[in-house]
């Protein structure tokens, strides 16, 4: 069974910064569109002939034209200089920290949490439908992060792990 606290003070401090970022973003109507199902969505260009294509962009902007989940928002916000993103060969954005790439790998190492904790905090699997998008979603993730850091999610996480079969 995973611990109910990030394993280091550094991890806890970083998670609390993410909670603050989410709360601030939720208050800003001109910021990203929050969606737990999307790491970061590229802008899409709709052509006159009715077709569309994804735009390759070097740096998504922090505006309402960008859609991102909590980790995607962290990547593009510049909150942490060492935690950023790459555009992979599929033309999609992946978090990166040092030599660790990908949603789970980079997030686990950067925040000093395990794979189950990444899933419980940052994926849509553990949130109600109404908590997955928009400002309400950002506030729900921020609240869960703060509860996790305070050690108040042990029972909920045990239920989740039991339901999924993870330990």
Image (cartoon, rainbow, N blue to C red):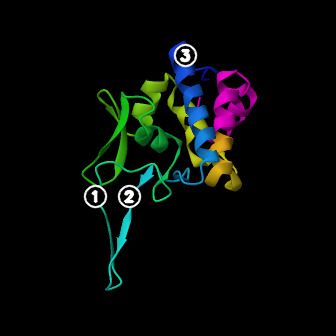
Picture disc at residue 2: none
The vertical placement of 26 against 47, above or below, is: above
Mark 2 sits on what residue? 42
Secondary element under disc 3, as helix, strand or loop, is loop
What residue is shown with label 3? 7
Q: Which residue does the image show at 52% across and 47% down from the upper left? A: 69
Q: Position of residue 34 (x, y in %)?
A: 56, 52
Is any atom of residue 132 visible in this view?
no
The answer to whether residue 162 is magenta is yes
Q: Residues within 10 Å of mark 3 (few under 14, many from 20)?
A: few
Q: Nearer the N terminus, badge 2 or badge 3?
A: 3
Q: Quadrant of residue 142?
A: top right
Q: Secondary structure at mark 1?
A: loop
Taking 92 as reference, is 71 left or right? right
Q: Is 153 situated above or below 62?
A: above
Q: Which residues are magenta?
A: 142-167
Check contact, mark 1 vs mark 2: CB within 8 A: yes
Q: Earlier in the sequence, mark 1 or mark 3?
A: 3
Q: Which residue is drawn at the image coordinates 67% and 28% (left, top)?
A: 146
Q: Which one is in front in this view, the residue at disc 1 or the one at disc 3? A: 1
Please name the residue that numbered disc 1 is placed on. 56
Q: Are marks 2 and 3 in contact (CB under 8 Å)?
A: no
* Quadrant the N terminus occupies: top right
């Amino acid at each position: 069974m995973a611990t109910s606290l990030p394993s280091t003070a550094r991890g806890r401090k970083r998670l609390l910064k993410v909670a603050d970022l989410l709360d601030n973003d939720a208050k800003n109507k001109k910021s990203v569109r929050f969606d737990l199902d999307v790491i970061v969505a590229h802008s899409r260009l709709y052509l006159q002939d009715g077709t569309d294509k994804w735009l390759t962009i070097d740096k998504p902007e922090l505006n309402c034209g960008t859609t991102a989940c909590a980790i995607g928002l962290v990547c593009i916000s510049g909150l942490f200089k060492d935690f950023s993103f790459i555009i992979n060969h599929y033309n999609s954005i992946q978090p990166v920290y040092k030599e660790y790439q990908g949603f789970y790998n980079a997030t686990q190492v950067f925040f000093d949490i395990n794979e189950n904790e990444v899933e419980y905090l940052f994926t849509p699997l553990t949130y109600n439908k109404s908590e997955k998008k928009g400002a309400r979603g950002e506030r729900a993730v921020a609240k869960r992060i703060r509860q996790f850091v305070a050690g108040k999610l042990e029972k909920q996480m045990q239920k989740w792990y039991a339901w999924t079969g993870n330990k």
